[in-house]
Every structure is written in C-alpha cells, then in structure tokens.
Image (cartoon, rainbow, N blue to C red):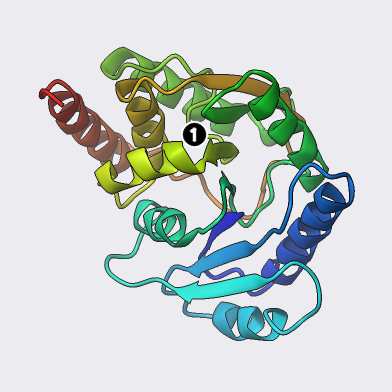
Amino acid sequence: MVVPAFNEEASIEWATRSLRAGLRGAEDLGAVGATEVVVVDDHSTDATWAVLERLATEDGPPLRAIAATGPQGLGATIRQGLGAASGDLVLYTDAALPFDPVEIPRLVGTLSRYDADVVCGYRLDRTSEGYRRAAQSHAFNVLARVLLPIRIRDVNFACKLLRRSALDVVVPDLRSDGPFIDAELVARFAHHDLRVVQVGVDYFPRFDAASTLGGPAAIRSIVTEAVELRRDLRRPR
C-alpha cells in the first residue's frame, strides 16, 4: 500500500490502522502474502510525522514512514512512494481512505482473474459528495479523455493496483508534481500497452478538504500538463 499524506495528524492513525486491518484480512484469506504500508509525508506542518513514527512501532503489517524529499505536491509524493514500494503488487490510495480496505482481496482477485497489469477502481455512487465536487471531477475526466489516450471512467480516483512489472515500466516516466499525477499514470498505462481492468467500489467521500481540481489556476495547470504529456507520448519509444 502506498499512501501520500499532508497534515493528516487528525486522521492518519485511523487510516493506517484501517489499512493494516484490511491487509491482515487479505493475508488471512490467502489473497496476498507479506504486506506493508508505505506512507509518504508531504512536508506536513502539523504532527503527522510524529504520529507516523509512533504507529510504525505497533504490531501488524509493517508501516514504513518516509519523509518526502524534493518538491511539495501530491504527484511528487506519490512518485516517491511508488518508487519506494517493494512489493510484487502495489496499491495506491490516499489518506482519506476513499474505499473500504476490505475490497483489497477483490481487487487482487480481479487482477489475477483477468491476467491484467493494472486494476483501476471507480466510484459506484457519487451523490453523497455534493454536486460541485462531482461536477468538477466529471469535467476533469472529460478533459483528460479529450486530451490524452485515456479510456478509464474515473481517472482521478485514488484506487490503482499495479503489478511490479507495470510499476517498473511506468514510474521512471512520471513527471507530474501535482494532482495531474492520476491522469499521467493512466495515460502512461495506455502508452505502454498495459492491460487495465476497472472495478466499481463503494465510495466514501472526504468532506474536510477542498477539491484540488477546481479554480482557474488549477485548470490552466492541468491543461498545460496534459498538452505537454500528449507531446511527450507522441515521441517514438
């Protein structure tokens, strides 16, 4: 499990314990072998790091806390976390736990059943998050599919399971430091002809943080990164 975290002192203990319980359940079912949670602290200014250091000493699937280096931002943090992950399977989510970790065996089973390289989760019901956030996410998905070779229905949902072979191909190419990272990941899956399957999961929205996809500045940044990525993907491999 790879989890980026920024100023999550109030919720990171609940999140990591929930993830560890989910991983322990997946181990007990035989869905996975040894597991680990890698949390990358994105230059937090609160007590997130201190909480992570304490949690790392608790029993359960190992928790490895990493202090982010380099630029601040969701993309930079995810890139560092994916690069540090050592498992044969790597599942990325965020500290809000937008899906129930009890779904982990089903995600792994889908990967195996369809002999896929990647499983991308999508939100089954988004009505609880409110019209504005749902509209912003829908607009982002449409924009990403127009500008990039993307056929994923829920581009920016933090539920992506990758085989090690797929991770090793994609991670060295990643460039985004911000919230565009999900679109870049999915576009590079397609660029490398990776087999992707999609799975619907129950969605648990977060209400204590504003969307990073709205606003003129964010939209300009997304469009700029998308155009640059499209140009990069058109270069011969």
Please give left or right for residue 108 compared with residue 221 in the image.
right
Q: Nearer the viewer, residue 121 or 215?
A: 121
In which quadrant of the rendered image does the N terminus lie?
A: bottom right
User: Considering only vertical position in the picture, is 113 above or below 50?
Assistant: above
Residue 154 image position (x, y, % from top left): 54, 24
In this rendering, position of residue 98 left or right of residue 88: right
Judge left or right: residue 221 versus residue 62.
Answer: left
Q: Which residue is drawn at the image coordinates 64% and 28% (left, top)?
A: 111
Q: Can residue 213 be seen?
A: no
Q: Position of residue 46 (x, y in %)?
A: 54, 80
Q: Across the whole image, how many numbered discs are drawn on residues?
A: 1
Q: In the structure shown, which secondary structural element does the residue marked by tag 1 occupy?
A: loop
Q: Which residue is depicted at the point 51% across and 21% down?
A: 196
**Residue under circle 1?**
156
Please identify the quarter of the rendering in which residue 114 is found.
top right
Which class describes the residues within 10 Å of circle 1: few (<14), some (14-19), or many (20+)? Answer: many
**Residue 10's x, y, as percent?**
69, 72
Q: Residue at x 81, y 48 (%)?
A: 26
Relative placement, left or right, of 202 versus 193 is right
Above or below for 140 versus 44: above
Q: Is residue 200 above or below residue 72?
A: above
Residue in view at x 69 percent, y 71 percent: 62
Residue 111 or residue 234, whichever sits in front: 111
Q: Does residue 201 appear in this view?
A: yes
* 186 lies above or below 100: above
Residue type, mark 1 in image: Asn
- Residue 199 image position (x, y, % from top left): 67, 23
